[in-house]
Amino acid sequence: MVELFELLREAAPVLMTGAMYTLLFALASMVGGLAIGFPVAVMRLSPWALVRWPASVYVSAMRGTPLLVQLFVIYYGLPSIGIEFTPVTAGVLALSLNAGAYLSESLRGAIQSIGQGQWRASFSLGLGYWQSLWFVVMPQALRVAAPSMSNTLISLIKDTSLVSVITMTELMLSTKEVIAVTFQPLPLYIAAACIYWIMSLGFEHLQRIAERRLNRAHR
């Protein structure tokens, strides 16, 4: 027991550094995913097939292929046609593209759940389509989409473990590096799992706070 405690104490700084990078990558990917997801959701709602079709193909491709394969395509595949990324850029890009597909579906469903009466009321006040979407429909849609969007962020925290395969420093790669030195995989992998769990619990708590505030603002 003393040896185990000493092992975890010595490994803690490395694991905490990896956890910090995991959080940063997850948050950066969430921002990137939102930047992608919102326009894709609007494109998916377009009455024009030429606008709707590319967005539908993108969402289908991202949701229908493993994130690990997407990482390999971006980091190992694209250099064959002259497009190269650093591990950090490739990891954040892959996570953002993947999250953007799921976030777009959450936003699209939330926008569609807002009654047509809200659109008609905003049009009657002289607002255009984009003004109605941004100032009237989107605030209500975000309240509806908040739980699924929060779940996407929590999933991103766990999905960052996959980017260790492209030598991107985060919690899982940090854990593997410590294991390579100590040859103690079981306690260190359990410690890494606990850190992921704690981070997820923290975001679940923030999710509940955000949902309560959005619900109060809607009343």
Image (cartoon, grey):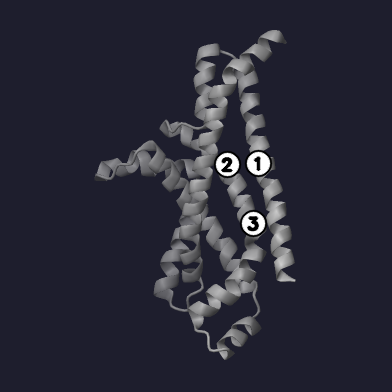
Q: The disc labelled 2 sits on which kind of residue?
A: Ile
Q: Quadrant of residue 120?
A: bottom right
| Label 2, label 3: how far apart the Cα atoms are | 15 Å
Tell me if residue 55 comes above or below residue 175 in the rendering: below
Quadrant assignment for the C terminus: bottom right
Q: Quadrant of residue 11?
A: top right
Q: Residue at x 70, y 9 (%)?
A: 2
Q: Earlier in the sequence, mark 2 or mark 1?
A: 2
Q: Residue at x 62, y 86 (%)?
A: 121
The label nearer to you, 3 versus 1, is 1
Residue, disc 3: 148
User: From this viewpoint, is residue 59 visible?
Assistant: no
| Label 2, label 1: how far apart the Cα atoms are | 7 Å
User: From this viewpoint, is residue 16 visible?
Assistant: yes
Q: The disc labelled 3 sits on which kind of residue?
A: Ser
Find residue 184 and report its horizontal and vertical position in percent: 59, 14
Q: For numbered disc 1, what is the local secondary structure? A: helix
Q: Bin the neighbour count of mark 2 within 10 Å (Cα to Cα): few under 14, some 14-19, many 20 and up.
A: many
The numbered disc on residue 157 is 2
Q: The disc labelled 1 sits on which kind of residue?
A: Ser
Tell me if residue 132 comes above or below residue 87 in the rendering: below
Q: For numbered disc 2, what is the local secondary structure? A: helix
The numbered disc on residue 200 is 1
Q: Residue at x 59, y 82 (%)?
A: 119
